[in-house]
């Protein structure tokens, strides 16, 4: 078991190292932060001063060496835009983004999973078709279209809610709904198909045949077995909590990590991009580990197999 | 002993509530000025409010006229010509020296009076130049002791570079008395007054700088003299300003101004229509008619001090012959671009110059005429065989950039020029040297009212085009030097004319397409007038 997790942890570290290297190559090879941050009309001597100050005139391999060496020492660098610590910049945006993504996750789970279960249990009924129609619509409509439509209805036409910004809880309602609907739709579809697959298994027939009440069959046998694929998707959604709202944050002018990432990439602000990527990679890896644990908890067969393997 | 009955307690309670309401009411009565919210695409690219660090158009919008002010101001609602600002009068003591009388009674945001000491500090090494030197400084003066900045107060490297660009030969500024200052230049320079009016030559409180813990702390909340002071700056999010009640120009008409960053155009328009924002800036021209369909709203604004150019690399095999570049300039129907993409709300200017140049403006100069027959003839003379000419393009960095590029390529194709668009991602890729660099887009501003600020700064020997090896011309370089140092106005004007002939006709470095413009949407009921600039003027008199 220990070896199982050690291998996973090792893979996670390699993944993060590759992500960081990839970020460096892509960002440094595709643009000079000095020219981009200072703008196209900046005088040559201003650009030169900026390059010198940030070490951008060093050979590229030396820049990579410094960059990677600093990360290994836990130094994530400073933003080239205003000289502030990158980690400080990113961490102050995390609660702002979580204020959207956590309620949205609650909507995704609270709406998507019950809707999927209900649709599966009433397969072929009008309710099933309605849930599936809404689900298809929910995850096929791009979030910027859905967001702007909601703004048009609730801000421009009805005047009930603000169209953007981050001044109060009312400003969060439309972006949370926009984020929540798409995820709920995905979860509803996955839950429904997982439930349908489980409901067709022999052990469900056996349980029914030996007289177990239908409710107990569903709660005791169907749901835990159908939970595996659903947990995988929820795990992925947890992984996107930090930087999964890039488009919605832009549409609703919400100053979270997503917008910071867009600005940092556009400006080739390497330290900030790197910091966000490390955070996203770490969140993804952590959520994958949690999902791995949950698999073992939900399905005793996986625990036994892991035990045998070790 | 006082006894508290229920009635008495109630009376006391009501009286207390009433008393507590009085001051609130009084404050409300005393300040009925409105507060407004302005949606912009970006507040500051560099995340600071320092005029020498943030040198972008978006910065100009929030800085002027609300926060920063210079000794010589501009006619912000007119033609941007010089006006008395923090100085009431100025005179030349010789060709290298300007003396200015400061306006008395000007208060900084911290309540202190502005004096000559603050002006001297605003142009000091500590604030502006660090250890950079004037270009033509004598060696004796170079023995001056250069003060070391305090820890945390080191200037970002680009600040002294930008300051020297603005003031290449400024030796020192001296306080003659409490309200008189003198600017000493190393060389004769007729543009000193223009440089005093330019973006970046603005005055700050010395005490404000000294009390800030670090450069960043100061640059997020500079203490200046403008009609509004910074309350809070949340980078990439919002900037809140509050009326500076002791403003020398009268009581500011707004209680608060809040700039909020709304990166998406539809979101800015939706916020305006829903009443959340009173102004929506950076409106693309194709949205103007849609907004104005609603009778309650209008779109204001127009041309700014910035021209859109198409720039040539004369080292490219197909562009070495100036006849080919001339053909490129003669095959563009610029008015068609203005009419179709800008709804006619900008104009084709008289080459790379602006009306506010005053005496130096050549009113009879024009961009190359649209003449496809002449263009074909020039190509024939050049022996152009239809070989491809690369055109590096950014995805709509400039308004209408993609559409303009496609129109240009078709116009060029119609006279036999084979120009091929290569879309790239950023300015580094645009400027990268090599065979794939032929044509690119650019824009040029004129920070002060003299051609030195534009044609020399951008296309002269120290300008970007020559520095990145796109173009050079020996005569142009000699004339640039002359324009920077001569004080003979008639000869300077003639030299400028010759520069226009070289850069726009004989050996084209670029061709001007149209003047750039910016558009701001607002409710018609708000009585406010836009400046012919990015700057938004909310001083007394311009918001009723």
Image (cartoon, helix red, strand yellow):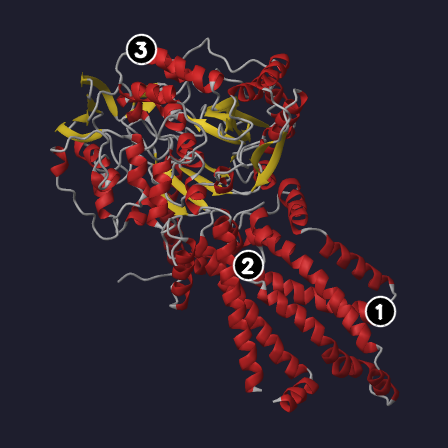
> Can residue B351 be seen here?
no
Q: Is residue A257 above or below residue B491?
A: below
C-alpha distance separating marks 3 and 2? 60 Å
Mark toward the viewer: 3 or 2:
3
- Quarter of the figure with residue B134: top left
- Quarter of the figure with residue A71: bottom left
The residue shown at (80%, 67%) is A119
Query: For the N terminus of chain B, which image quadrant?
Result: bottom left
**Element on which disc 3 rests:** helix
Report x, y in % for residue A96.
50, 57
The reply to whether label 3 and label 2 mark residues of one chain is no
Q: Is residue B533 above or below residue A195?
A: above
Chain letter of disc 3? B
The residue shown at (60%, 51%) is A247
> Can residue B227 be seen here?
yes
Q: Identify the residue under disc 1.
A: A122
Tell me whether circle 3 and circle 1 mark residues in contact (CB < 8 Å): no
Mark toward the viewer: 1 or 2:
2
Q: Identify the residue under disc 2.
A: A243
Taking depth in this image into account, of A153 and B466 the one nearest to the observer is B466
Report x, y in % for residue B334.
58, 19
Chain letter of disc 1? A
Q: Is residue B427 above or below residue B500?
A: below
Query: For the C terminus of chain B, which image quadrant?
Result: top left
> In this figure, what is the number of numbered marks?
3
Which label is found at residue A1?
A: none
Q: Identify the residue under disc 3.
A: B491
């Amino acid at each position: 078991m220990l070896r199982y997790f050690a291998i996973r942890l090792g893979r996670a570290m390699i993944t993060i190292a590759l992500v960081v290297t990839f970020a460096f190559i892509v960002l440094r090879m595709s643009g000079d932060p000095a020219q981009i941050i200072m703008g196209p009309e900046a005088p040559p001597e201003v650009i030169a001063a900026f390059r010198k100050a940030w070490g951008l005139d060093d050979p590229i391999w030396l820049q990579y060496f410094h960059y990677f060496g600093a990360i290994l020492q836990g130094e994530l660098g400073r933003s080239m835009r205003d000289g502030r610590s990158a980690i400080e910049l990113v961490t102050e945006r995390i609660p702002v983004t979580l204020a959207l993504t956590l309620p949205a996750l609650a909507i995704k789970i609270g709406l998507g999973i019950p809707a999927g279960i209900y649709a599966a249990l009433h397969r072929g009924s009008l309710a099933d078709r309605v849930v599936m129609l809404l689900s298809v619509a929910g995850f096929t409509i791009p979030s910027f279209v859905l967001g702007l439509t909601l703004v048009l209805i609730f801000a421009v036409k009805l005047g009930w809610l603000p169209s953007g910004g981050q001044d109060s809880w009312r400003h969060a309602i439309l972006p949370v709904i926009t984020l929540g609907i798409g995820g709920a739709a995905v979860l509803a579809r996955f839950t429904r198909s997982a439930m349908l697959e489980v409901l067709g298994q022999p052990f469900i027939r056996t349980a029914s045949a030996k007289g177990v009440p239908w409710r107990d069959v569903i709660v005791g046998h169907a749901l835990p077995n159908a939970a595996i694929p659903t947990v995988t998707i929820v795990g992925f959604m947890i992984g996107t909590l930090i930087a999964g709202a890039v488009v919605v944050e832009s549409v609703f002018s919400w100053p979270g990590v997503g917008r910071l990432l867009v600005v940092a990439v556009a400006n080739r602000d390497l330290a900030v991009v790197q910091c966000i990527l490390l955070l996203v990679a770490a969140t993804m890896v952590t959520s994958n580990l949690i999902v791995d644990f949950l698999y073992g908890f939900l399905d005793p067969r996986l625990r036994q197999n892991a035990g045998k393997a070790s | 002993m006082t006894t508290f009955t229920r009635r008495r307690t109630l009376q006391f309670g009501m009286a207390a509530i009433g008393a507590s309401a009085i001051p609130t009411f009084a404050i409300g009565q005393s300040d009925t000025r409105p507060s407004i919210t302005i949606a912009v695409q970006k507040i500051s690219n560099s995340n600071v409010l320092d005029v020498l660090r943030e040198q972008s158009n978006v910065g100009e919008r929030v800085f002027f006229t609300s926060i920063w002010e210079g000794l010589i101001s501009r006619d912000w609602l007119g033609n941007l010509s010089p006006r008395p600002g923090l100085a009431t009068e100025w005179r030349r003591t010789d060709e290298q020296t300007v003396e200015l009388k400061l306006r008395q009674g000007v208060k900084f945001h911290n309540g202190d009076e502005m004096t000559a000491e603050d002006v001297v500090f605003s142009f000091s090494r500590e604030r502006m130049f660090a250890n950079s030197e004037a270009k033509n400084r004598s060696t004796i003066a170079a023995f001056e002791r250069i003060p070391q900045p305090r820890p945390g107060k080191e200037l970002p490297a680009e600040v002294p570079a930008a300051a020297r660009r603005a003031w290449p030969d400024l030796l020192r500024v001296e306080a003659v008395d409490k309200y008189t200052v003198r600017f000493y230049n190393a060389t004769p320079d007729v543009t000193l007054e223009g440089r005093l009016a330019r973006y970046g030559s603005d005055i700050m409180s010395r005490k404000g700088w000294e009390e800030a813990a670090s450069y960043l702390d100061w640059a997020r909340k500079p203490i200046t003299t403008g009609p509004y002071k910074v309350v809070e700056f949340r980078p990439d999010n919002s900037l809140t300003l509050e009326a500076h009640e002791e403003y020398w120009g009268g009581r500011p008409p707004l209680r608060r101004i809040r700039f909020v960053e709304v990166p998406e155009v539809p979101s800015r328009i939706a916020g305006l229509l829903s009443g959340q924002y009173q102004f929506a800036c950076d409106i693309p021209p194709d949205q103007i008619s849609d907004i104005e369909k609603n009778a309650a709203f209008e779109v204001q604004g127009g041309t700014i001090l910035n021209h859109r150019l198409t720039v040539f690399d004369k080292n490219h095999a197909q562009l070495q012959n100036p006849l080919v570049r001339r053909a490129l300039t003669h095959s563009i129907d610029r008015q068609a671009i203005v009419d179709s993409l800008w709804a006619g709300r900008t104009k084709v200017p008289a080459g790379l110059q602006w009306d506010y140049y005053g005496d130096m403006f050549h009113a009879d100069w024009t961009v190359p005429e649209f003449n496809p027959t002449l263009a074909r003839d020039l190509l024939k003379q050049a022996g152009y065989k239809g070989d491809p000419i690369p055109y590096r393009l950014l995805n709509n960095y400039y308004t209408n950039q993609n559409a303009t590029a496609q129109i240009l390529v078709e116009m060029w194709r119609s006279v036999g020029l084979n120009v091929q668009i290569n879309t790239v991602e950023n300015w580094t890729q645009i400027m990268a040297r090599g065979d794939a660099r032929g044509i690119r887009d650019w824009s040029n501003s004129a920070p002060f009212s003299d051609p030195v600020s534009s044609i020399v700064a951008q296309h002269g020997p120290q300008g970007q085009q020559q520095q990145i090896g796109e173009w050079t011309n020996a005569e142009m370089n000699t004339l640039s030097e002359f324009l920077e140092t001569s004080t003979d106005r008639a000869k300077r004007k003639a030299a400028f004319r010759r520069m226009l002939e070289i850069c726009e006709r004989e050996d084209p470095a670029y061709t001007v397409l149209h003047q750039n413009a910016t558009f701001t949407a607002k409710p018609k009921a708000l009585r406010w007038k836009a400046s012919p600039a990015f700057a938004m003027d909310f001083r007394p008199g311009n918001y009723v």
